[in-house]
Amino acid sequence: MHLVQISEAASLAIHSMALLIQNRGGFLTVKDMAQECEASEAHLAKVMQKLAKARLVTATRGPQGGYTLTKEGEEASLLTIYEAVEGAIMPRECLLKSKICLFSTCIFGGVIEKAEREIKEYFASKKLKDLVK
């Protein structure tokens, strides 16, 4: 178990967009990206549809087609990519999902919320293009 977990879909979104950055404006097919990521084509296709809906990538049909980044995709932060696939990050509720806390104040003392806020700020501050070598 890990303290911070990122879904497979969000990880695929970030990795596939990194592949598109490395491809420098060329097209990549879902099949090619799925092979590189060692992922299911069907799952990656759904992820790419979400990225296209968020206007981070564009799809072109045909034998020379595939996906490429849009201008927005080229400048996207990790947070933008993550939220395109997973939706907006919401503030954390009680970890026990309790309506009434057992203690007068949260026993975690805001540590979980602070860590999540810092991760969100980090993701917002990092553009994927700056992380891809």
Image (cartoon, rainbow, N blue to C red):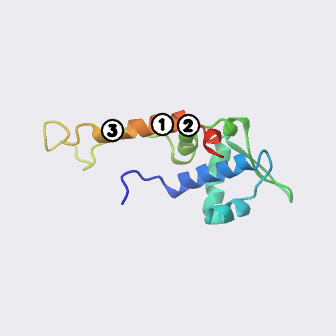
| Element at label 1 | helix
- Residue 20: where, in percent of width, then height? 71, 49
- Residue 111: where, in percent of width, then height? 28, 39
Residues at marks 1 and 2 touching, judged by CB atoms closer than 8 Å: yes
Q: Amino acid at mark 1?
A: Tyr
Q: Pointer 1: residues within 10 angstroms few (<14), some, or many (20+)? A: some
- Residue 7: where, in percent of width, then height? 49, 55
Residue at (68% x, 65% y) in the render = 35
Q: Quadrant of residue 64?
A: bottom right
Q: Earlier in the sequence, mark 2 or mark 3?
A: 3
| Element at label 2 | loop
Q: Earlier in the sequence, mark 1 or mark 3?
A: 3
Residue extending furthest toward the front: 133
Q: Amino acid at mark 2?
A: Lys
Residue named by callout 2: 126
Q: Quadrant of residue 24?
A: top right
Note whether 75 is above or below 84 in the view shown.
Answer: above
On residue 113, which mark appears?
A: 3
Residue named by callout 1: 122
